[in-house]
Image: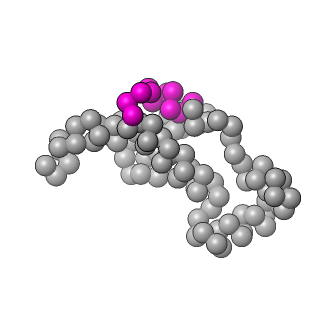
């Protein structure tokens, strides 16, 4: 997956990066980069739930620079690490309010 940047989106829409940034935040309440991260992490959660990929493969599929950065963004968005998410799916009744 290619990296998607504010500049790329602005160029595709033929508007300035500043205008896109301000308009997007005004309309959605979040920044474009935070929105992109949220969408990627939602997709990552779906991929983790399939148990078909290793974490570094998911990181690579979603265009993260490295698995460490993927894990950092995942935790920022969800509040838990990718491994914790995987364990909640695999072992849903351990340590989480069972």
Question: Total of numbered circles in the picture?
Answer: 0
Magenta span includes 42: no
Residue at 54% from the left image edge and 46% from the top image edge: 40
Q: In the image, is 21 to the left or to the right of 13?
A: left
Residue 72 seen in render: no
Q: Residue at x 64, y 35 (%)?
A: 1
Main SS type for the magenta part? helix
Residue 35 placement (x, y as % from top left): 58, 57
Query: At x 60% / y 52%, what residue is drawn?
Result: 36
Residue 64: give x, y in percent of width and height. 59, 36
Q: Position of residue 54 (x, y in %)?
A: 44, 26
- In the rendered view, tell whether residue 21 sits above or below residue 37: below
Please say whether residue 17 is visible from this viewpoint: yes
Residue most extreme to the bottom: 26
Closer to the camera, 40 or 70?
A: 40
**Is residue 14 left or right of 48 when viewed as pictured?**
right
- Residue at 72% x, 69% y is 22
The region drawn magenta spans 50-60
Comparing 93 with 82, the one in front is 93
Residue 48, image x, y percentages: 41, 36
Q: Residue furthest left?
A: 98
């Amino acid at each position: 997956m290619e990296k998607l940047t504010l500049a790329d989106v602005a160029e595709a829409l033929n508007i300035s990066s500043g205008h896109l940034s301000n308009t997007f935040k005004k309309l959605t309440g979040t920044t474009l980069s935070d929105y992109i991260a949220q969408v990627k992490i939602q997709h990552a959660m779906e991929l983790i739930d399939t148990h078909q990929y290793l974490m570094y493969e998911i990181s690579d599929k979603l265009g993260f620079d490295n698995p460490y950065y993927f894990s950092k963004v995942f935790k920022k968005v969800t509040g838990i690490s990718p491994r914790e998410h995987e364990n909640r799916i695999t072992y849903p009744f351990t340590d989480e309010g069972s």
